[in-house]
Image (tube, helix red, strand yellow):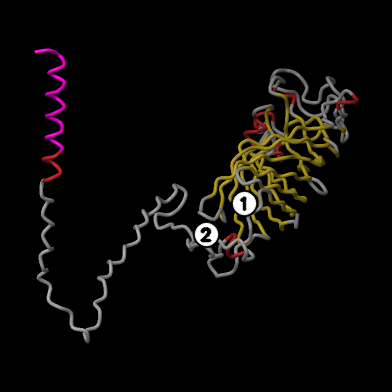
Amino acid sequence: MSWRSFGIVGATFAFVSQTAFAQAPPPPPPPPPLPTTEPPKDPKEPPKEAPKEAPKEAPKETPKEAPKERPADWVDAKPGEDKPANPDEKDPKKPQTPEDQFGTEDDGKPAEKKAASRYFLGARFRDFVVPNFIFSLFADGGPDVVNIFSGGPEFMLNTGALEVIFSVTVPYADYSMDEFLFKASSDPERAFEFASSSLKLITASVDLLGRIPIDDKGTVAFLIGGGVGISGVLGNIYRNQAYPVNPGDADPSDVTKWRKCKAPGDGNQAPDGGDYCGTDNDHYGEYSEPSWSDGGSKPIVFPYIALPHLALEVTPVEEFMVRLDTGFSITGFFFGLGGGGRLPI
């Protein structure tokens, strides 16, 4: 069979296929939809409303953690509020009262702001007691006990833990002493002399005291520290050689058993063969000791050193202070009372 015969057969097959497709019947129509089971609606029945969705709950706010410097029940103020929600916080628009700033005292009155430094102006009184053993440290003999009274104004600075007291003795501390027997420790027994004093000291001093409150409010406080100062010396020291009435009973603690020498050679001889009234000095007839500037032993100035200085201070009200003092100085033990009013500065 040739290629031409195949072409004729193919064309004949295609023609027959198209003729058969054109003569085929059309496809059947789709089936009608099945009826629903929903009952017919009553025209008088109102239309049903669509079910409403449940309202969504607002998300709960996570409570804020209280800052470390706030109380545990602290919360933020709501928007638009002028006053903070925390009652412990102060309203910035409300003027602060003394009660808000400093609280109240026990009596309900507004408490006063405690100043960093307080200043008082007042006065003090002191009694210096010089026992005999202090004289014995430097010489033989001396008076039994000497009381030296002094007083003067005080200016006090209180800075909380420290108290500074400036004082001046006005008019002076009177170191006058009645006659007593006295000699240097290195001198022989026949060297006793009558001595007396009209000395007066004007002292400027400063006391530095640590302040230890005893109660919570600091109304009562214990003070401890010391003081230094300088004294100007006025007056005279009188000396006169002496001899015992009975050389066998020469008690230097009893001035009635001695007499003043009027001149060298006066009186009795000493047990060692020497004269009580000698020529080793001219201490006769109310002799007055020269000062340092004239080669004598009377001082022009004298140091003031107090250590320790102890005190009990009471401040019953802010405007007034009173203080009890005691301590030891190179001029003797002292006991005193001081007080003053607060300055408005």
Element on which disc 2 rests: loop
Circle number at residue 324: 1
Q: Nearer the viewer, residue 232 or 145?
A: 232
Observer-side mark, 1 or 2, equals 2
**Magenta stretch in the rendered image:** 1-18
User: Tag 2: residue type?
Assistant: Glu
Q: Is residue 11 magenta?
A: yes
Q: Nearer the viewer, residue 245 or 94?
A: 94
Sequence-wise, the earlier of marks 1 and 2 is 2
Q: CA distance from mark 1 to mark 2?
A: 44 Å
Measured as percent of width and height from the top left, residue 259 is found at 77, 36
Farthest residue, direction right:
294
> Can you say whether 220 is above or below 309 in the image?
below
User: Tag 1: residue type?
Assistant: Leu
> Can you say whether 76 is above or below 198 in the image?
below
Measured as percent of width and height from the top left, residue 176 is found at 78, 43
Residue 110, picture quadrant: bottom right
Q: Residue at x 59, y 45 (%)?
A: 211
Circle number at residue 237: none
192 relative position to 134: left or right: right
Q: Nearer the viewer, residue 90 or 160?
A: 90
294 relative position to 163: left or right: right
Q: Quadrant of the C terminus?
A: bottom right
Residue 4, picture quadrant: top left
Main SS of the magenta part reads helix
Q: Quadrant of the N terminus?
A: top left
Q: Residues within 10 Å of mark 1 (few under 14, many from 20)?
A: some
Q: Residues within 10 Å of mark 2 (few under 14, many from 20)?
A: few
Circle number at residue 89: 2
> Can you say whether 187 is above or below 243 in the image?
above
Element on which disc 1 rests: strand
